[in-house]
Amino acid sequence: MSKYQPEQFHQQAADALADPQLRQNFRGAMDYLQEKRRSAFADPKEEADIRDCAEAIRQRCLSHLPELLEQLEANCTANGIQVHWAENAADANAIFLAIAQAATSPSDHPLLMIKGKSMVSEEINLNHEMAKHGITCLESDMGEYIIQLDGDTPSHIIMPAIHKNKQQVCDTFSEHLPHFTPTTDVDTLIQTGRQQLREKFRTAQIGVSGVNFAVAETGTLCLVENEGNGRMCTTVPDIHIAITGIEKVVAYLSDVPPLYSALTRSATGQAITTYFNMISSPRKPGELDGPKAVHLILLDNGRTQAYQDEETRQTLQCIRCGACMNHCPVYTRIGGHAYGTVYPGPIGKIISPHLLGLEATQDLVTASTLCGACGEVCPVRIPIPSLLQRLRHEAKQPPDPGHDPLKGQRAAASTSEALMMKGFALAATHPALYHAGTWTAGKVNQWIPDKLGHWTQCRTAPKPAPKSLHHLMKRKRKGESS
């Protein structure tokens, strides 16, 4: 399990800021990814057209989500894919365990699941939960494999080991891989990891993957990747289990190419990835390869809370490209671990409150300058800054009439803050009271202490001017000297 928790955000952020190597690693990586995206969207009109199209597709599909999920289930089932529904992480892990126990015999033990990249499997803490039952989950995505060796967790949704440089990867391999000759040559490091994983694909009983797009009209699961490990996980083991959030469904196969283009350009600046897998069924009679059984787990885990409100539903438009992180001035300085959530950065700050509740994530929704960079690069135009402001409101205030409370509604409410705001509102609407207050503040400013708790940790204490602007202007109009 992760040692980072969202409730410890402030301390984790302070620790990250005090780590010069971590900051250097992220600064270099984010600059690289920003430049790649700029190159991929060199034509502003083309960029706008792609984003308009992607946004429209996601909004259309989400507006028919219940019907599309039923259609997806029917067509997957007709194709021979077994569909399972999980309300939460516990349900999803129980399904994984039941499939593993039902489909294998004692001679298959110890069981090995080999995983392609899947943030939803991170969301349910699959590796840890399966380990409780003697099942090993081995990461095959190179970044995931590196951090698994270290007992670490991803710090980015598409580049999980981006917080490490090549010397740190070399150190990890030296510590965990026998007969490894230390080197910082990237190609050699990659080949070393692949050699370690190659045999595992053949011996694993179960392959696990995520899903980028689930096509309702055909019952097809689409998987985007660059390393080929996803194809190995979904074709070599006898059993393939795919897990995805319920929001990933699209209506038509023709919806996929525009979203695919928006995803790869925004994520890594690629026009297309090295591999694009389309999984429509288990191995059919007469076919020589492919899994004998394919399962699809559709996970809710708080997504229906976001779905039920028209504004927060926009959160579910996300196609997990990570562009918002790459351009966020907060994320680029503190990295992903500081957030303590599976999904860090701007998208994490608006999806995690629905998955974990506002009790745990109340500090995350305030960890933004609201500069708008995330919204400006989002390929599906999610209004992240306005959603953050909405969640800040929900963390402090009761739900508006006609709205159901969010999980953890008013978790950050403060009686003293509410009284102060009411006092300010009273003064601001009664000029005589306001001017009396500013006059008094000007008279006592020399007695205001230099230390004012959290406020002066990174700021100087406020010193009201001896005379307010209103007072000075009033005297000027009278022709008096200030």
Image: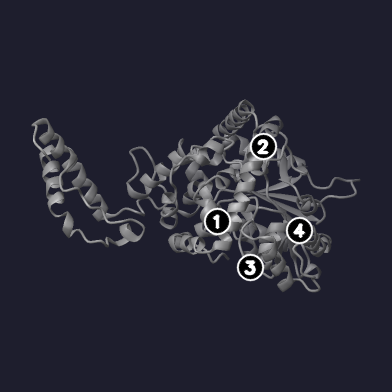
Q: Which residue position is annotated with label 4?
A: 186
Identify the residue shown where x is 27% and y is 56%.
461
Q: Which residue position is annotated with label 1?
A: 335
Give SS at disc 1: loop
Q: 117 left or right of 64?
A: right
**Alpha-carbon distance for marks 1 and 3?**
17 Å
Give SS at disc 3: loop
Dots 4, 2 in contact, CB < 8 A: no
Q: Quadrant of residue 434?
A: top left
Quadrant in which the N terminus appears: bottom right
Q: Nearer the viewer, mark 4 or mark 3?
A: 4
Amino acid carrying mark 1 in the image = Gly
Q: Return the mark for residue 475.
A: none
Q: Earlier in the sequence, mark 1 or mark 2?
A: 2
Tell me how many marks there are: 4
Q: Tell me where residue 222 appears, x and y as whole percent.
A: 72, 42
Q: Tell me where residue 389 appears, x and y as whole percent.
A: 40, 42
Q: Residues within 10 Å of mark 3 (few under 14, many from 20)?
A: few
Q: Which residue position is annotated with label 3?
A: 151
Amino acid carrying mark 4 in the image = Val
Q: Return the mark for residue 39.
A: 2
Quadrant in which the C terminus appears: top left
Q: Tell me where residue 54 appears, x and y as whole percent.
A: 61, 32
Identify the residue shown where x is 62% and y is 52%.
28
Q: Quadrant of residue 122?
A: bottom right
Q: Earlier in the sequence, mark 2 or mark 3?
A: 2
Amino acid carrying mark 2 in the image = Ser
Q: Is residue 8 above or below residue 291?
A: below
Choose between 294 and 313: the one closer to the eye: 313
Dots 1, 2 in contact, CB < 8 A: no
